[in-house]
Image (cartoon, rainbow, N blue to C red):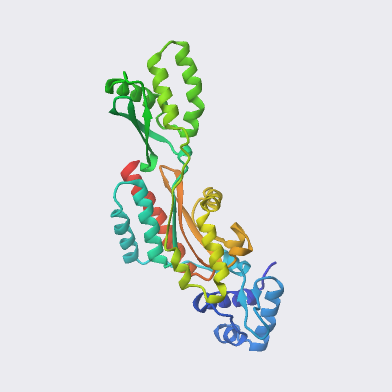
């Protein structure tokens, strides 16, 4: 429904008041904060109309109004002008990310902790699907007779190690030849693409009686088997206790259950991964009414134009979007820059 200028003003005041106080907002407060110069009675009429349109909710008779997720969606998409992140905060974030070390997993874990610390909410960092990221190189290292370590390095610095049994007669020199062949054949390909080609390549190698190629491809097949595990880093889950009152215990439990079942979170992240940038999603939109009091601010990180994963924060629906949206967006962009500089 199209809102009038008066209704937009009332939605703005009520949402901002609810973000600040997390309590129902009365008509007198709206009248005092508004530039419309209307009486409290007139404001009650406007608020009643907004309630009928689904933007406000009255928790009980004679109480003020509470904004619904529809009002928050309108506020975020239409009314809100996010504040610029102060330069000193940006510098603090950059320095903190720079201390994360070189391991990709450590960097993401650090990012989730940083987001949680900056937001006082749940920090989320999700690793990419290994099947969809591109191979930079593969190294094969002889651990001992009959045992090889396959080390696959992907764009963004993702490293996957796997121990593989081999024939006792395989030497370190053989492994160098295998790795050179595999890198020439599959460099800059995704695991998904590599898997499709391996069987065909193995058949061709066997037809040419090329034992070296066949053994190399066999090792690659085993190295990339079951390679779809994804890491999800969460920090600050107990912060939800600081934002909800005792009457909302069931809502808190629903959120913790959602976070515990990583498949639901990953399904959500996959839906968000196609977005070009920052996005705000509400619980009713990505899960259902059980998470109606929660929201997610997320933004993708990438290397060389390839989206790798998502970082974000989960908090109460009345979180401070004007501050947290630029914070999440800044961390995602700085994470992309860091990965680009170190691993591209």
How many labels, in total?
A: 0
Q: Position of residue 47 (x, y in %)?
A: 66, 79
Nearer to us in this view, 62 or 36: 62
Nearer to us in this view, 206 or 75: 206
Query: In which quarter of the view is residue 331 placed?
Result: bottom left
Nearer to us in this view, 243 or 333: 243
Query: In which quarter of the view is residue 205 placed?
Result: top left
Q: Is residue 39 visible?
A: no
In the image, residue 230 sits, relative to residue 86, either above or below, namely above
Q: Position of residue 65 (x, y in %)?
A: 62, 79
Q: Position of residue 242 (x, y in %)?
A: 46, 73
In the picture, the quarter occupied by the C terminus is top left
Does 98 sit left or right of 36 as displayed?
Answer: left
Q: Position of residue 227 (x, y in %)?
A: 46, 37
The residue under the point 50% across, 22% down is 199
Query: In which quarter of the view is residue 235 placed?
Result: bottom left
Does 54 sit left or right of 202 as displayed?
Answer: right
Nearer to us in this view, 69 or 259: 259
In the image, residue 340 sits, relative to residue 255, either above or below, namely above
In the picture, the quarter occupied by the N terminus is bottom right
């Amino acid at each position: 429904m199209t809102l009038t200028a008066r209704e937009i003003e009332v939605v703005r005041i009520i949402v901002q008041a609810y973000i600040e106080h997390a309590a129902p907002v009365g008509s007198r407060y709206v009248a005092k904060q508004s530039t419309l110069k209307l009486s409290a009675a007139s404001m009650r009429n406007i608020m009643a109309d907004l309630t009928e349109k689904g933007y406000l909710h009255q928790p009980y008779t004679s109480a003020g109004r509470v904004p619904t997720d529809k009002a928050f969606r309108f506020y975020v998409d239409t009314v809100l002008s996010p504040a610029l992140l102060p330069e000193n905060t940006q510098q603090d974030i950059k320095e903190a990310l720079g201390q994360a070390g070189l391991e990709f997993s450590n960097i993401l874990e650090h990012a989730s902790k940083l987001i949680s610390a900056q937001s006082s909410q749940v920090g989320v960092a999700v690793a990419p699907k290994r099947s969809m990221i591109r191979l930079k190189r593969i190294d094969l290292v002889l651990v001992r007779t009959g045992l090889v370590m396959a080390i696959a390095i992907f764009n963004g610095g993702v490293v996957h190690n796997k121990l593989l049994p081999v024939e006792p007669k395989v030497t370190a020199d053989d492994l160098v030849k295998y790795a050179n062949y595999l890198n020439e054949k599959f460099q800059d390909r995704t695991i998904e693409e590599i898997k499709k080609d391996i069987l065909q390549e193995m058949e061709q190698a066997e037809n040419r009686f090329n034992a070296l190629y066949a053994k190399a491809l066999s090792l690659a097949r085993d190295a990339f088997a079951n390679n779809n595990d994804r890491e999800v880093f969460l920090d600050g889950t107990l912060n939800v206790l600081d934002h909800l009152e005792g009457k909302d215990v069931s809502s808190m439990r629903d959120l913790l259950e959602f976070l515990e079942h990583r498949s639901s979170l990953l399904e959500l992240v996959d839906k968000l991964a196609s977005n070009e940038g920052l996005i705000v999603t509400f619980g009713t939109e990505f899960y259902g009414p059980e998470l109606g009091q929660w929201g997610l601010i997320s933004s993708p990180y990438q290397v060389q134009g390839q989206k790798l994963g998502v970082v974000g924060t989960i908090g109460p629906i009345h979180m401070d979007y004007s501050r947290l949206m630029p914070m999440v967006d800044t961390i995602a962009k700085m994470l992309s820059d860091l990965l680009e500089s170190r691993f591209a």
